[in-house]
Amino acid sequence: MNPELLAEFDAFLARVLPADYHERYADYRRDEALKIAYQAAAFDEGWLMPEWEGELGGHNLTEADGLALRIEGARRNVPRSPNVQGPGVVAPALRAFGTREQQQRYLRPVLRGDEWWALGMSEPLAGSDLASLRTRARLDGDHFVVDGQKIWTTQAHKSRWCTLYVRTDPDASKHAGISCLIMDLRSPGVDIRPIARAAESIDEFCEVFLDGVRIPKGNLLGELNDGWRVAGASLEHERDMVWVNNWVDVEHALRPVLDRPDLPGHVASEAGRLLADAAAIRFTGMRTAIGRMAGRSTPEFLLLKLFGSETAQRAGQLALEHGDGRADPHLFADRMESLAATIYGGTSEIQRNIIAEKVLGLPRDR
Amino acid sequence: MTTSPSALAAWDDLVPGAERQELADTARRHFAEQFPLTGVRECFGAGGRPLDRWVEIVEAGYPVIGLPESAGGIGGLTDLVAVVEESGRALLPLPLAATAAGRHTLIRGGLGVPAETDRSTALTTDPAAGVLDGAGAATVVTVAVVDDATTRVAEVTPAGAPELVTHVDPSRPVARWSGSIAEGRAQTVDATIDHVLAPARTIFAADLVGIAAGALQRSVDHALAREQFGRPIGAFQAVKHRLADHYVLVERARSLTRAAAVVVDHPELDTDWAPGVLALLAKAAAAEAALRITATHVQLLGAMGVTFEADAHLYFRRAEQTASVLGSTAECQIRAVRLMGTRR
């Protein structure tokens, strides 16, 4: 990566972040107003999606340079998007599957953060077994009419739009009858109820009840009954940011522990294992990115979510037990948050099934 | 132009290119065809190890990979670890890892490598305790701490036949010389012992990654073939989740080993760790992976796993014999943390 570009990025950060940002990062990392302002500024100046074109918050970088810049950003603790699934999942899905009209209407506001998005995936009876979802859409003239219920829908109450996964062909096999609809969360028949969280560091989530909600036919994202592919492909776009953030979070949690001069041997050993884990997340992530860009198969990609999220949990636990401030509320918040990360986006158990079946070739268990 | 440590191109060697992949594939076929596990089993008999076959390893050119061109070398440490991983997978009963570790440590010590001979080299930090895979070695490289920032590297020529302490793996015994040892060349370098040992630890890490990967593949093969309750045991989550975790352990160690090799080849990239730390972490991770995965391999075979006939104990013995060379997992982890602490 060209060093001038990095210098330009640093100058941008110096201009938009508060002077005491790095000093008081523990406070700022949960500052929603700052995150909102940062996302808009990063979009306007082309640092949000470095590989994309200028009109869409980008710098036209190659994939390799774009990832390098994202890594440098993460290492500098740049504020993460307050509605991370907007630019992280929805925007790439719109770009890959959206019609020209859909892209024109939705891309800029989702990237800039002007309109937030929710992912309508989990249901009360469809969690790990997502493909068994039952929320149903039937065509009525030029509208879909939707009935059903979603749950654990992150930030639904603050979002304007939702990528809603619905069953459009009840007779097809369970993966084949699903479609993705773009739903206006202000539509009549949508009832959003926030769920009380165990701690404020857990992303806000909601139940979403859908009763005869009418969604224009033109809001179908991707092909009819091709929603399973849209879901899989759009979640993949987050793949690099997940490991980059896990790596940075683990190093961040470890730093105060490593700084303690009097670490007992068994704690130093566990800290050393985590030092290895952090570096292994980094280099495994880089292996997958380098391999992908060279057109190689990179099965080790499939371990990153499991390994990254579980390592973050152990790092959080070590920091809480052996850092400077015992039971420090910031560390507790991180630790609590890390317990959610092995559930959302596919539980650790599902990740192990995927590794065993897709990488090791072991038989399916169901 | 300076290279940013995040620039992916700088770390390209984390993924083998076509040439290195070909090298590794060739080595894998060579070891599988010429050195099947029956050779490891023969080490349990009176004949001992096939040291007379070391010349075949020399002729294949493996020991000079990664050495300077002035010493007849070719390629980098990243190429060497790809080959050593294959020798680990094959449980090669010859001292390739020890030889490479010894010679790369000589280079680190500024001593240069003697011209290729038909005899091996070995390495130790504790001559009294013995030398892993030292039998047949023309010279043994010794490494000793002078103080926190200074390390002494010497080359000694052992006299006479060593006593072989087989410990647990007769295909990789420890050699101990009781008589006087003639010290040859020696040099004191301004570097921590961990910096000096970085290539050697990386090489043994590659060996352990290979052992772990070989045992994991055999566990997977068994989990697919063995049926109970009317289905392959690999269909049960109790088995498949354990193997998925082991896959993570192998790739974790492999990523660290490759990264440790990259920073030996390209020291300018080693900006985020104290010198030698990545090799400590790689060695720690590889030893952990090898110990856990080979033990599980024994278990997964059921009663068959504790028979002499099954190969599982060969992997387990090799892992146990090698895991603590140049420091156990815990020792390497603690050392890495202390080095990172003093760095600030």
Image: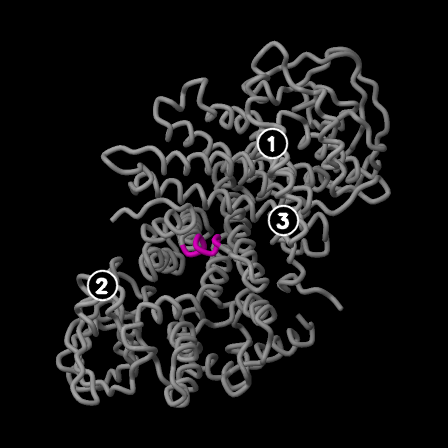
Residue A326 can be seen, yes or no = no
| Residue in view at x 58 percent, y 80 percent | A60
Identified by mark 3, the residue type is: Gln
Front of the two marks 3 and 1: 1
Other residues around mark 3 within 10 Å, as few (<14) / some (14–19) / many (≥20): some
How would you rate the neighbour count of disc 1 (Cα within 10 Å): few for under 14, some for 14-19, many for 20 or more?
few
Toward which corner of the image does residue B147 lie, by quadrant?
top right
Residue at (49, 84) in percent of width and height: A56
**Residue beneath label 3, please?**
B21
Q: Which residue is mark 2?
A: A173
Query: Label 2 sits on what residue type?
Result: Ser
Q: Earlier in the sequence, mark 3 or mark 1?
A: 3
Label 3 marks which chain's residue?
B
- Whether residue A136 sits left or right of residue B47 in the image: it is left
**Residue B322 in picture, x, y percent from top left:** 58, 28
* Quadrant occupied by the N terminus of chain A: bottom right
Q: Is residue A136 above or below residue B236?
A: below
Q: CA distance from mark 3 to mark 1?
A: 18 Å
Q: Residues within 10 Å of mark 2 (few under 14, many from 20)?
A: few
| Residue B251 image position (x, y, % from top left) | 51, 46
**Residue A47 visible in the displayed image:** yes
Read off the magenta span.
Answer: A299-305
Q: As rendered, which of A333 and B260 lies closer to the eye? A: B260
Is residue A309 toward the left or the right of residue B17 in the image?
left
Amino acid carrying label 1: it is: Glu
* Colour scheme of the picture: one colour
Label 1, on which residue? B33
Marks 3/2 in contact by CB < 8 Å: the verdict is no
Q: Helix, strand or loop at disc 2? A: loop
Label 1 near label 3: C-beta < 8 Å?
A: no
Chain of the residue under the numbered disc 2 shown in the image = A
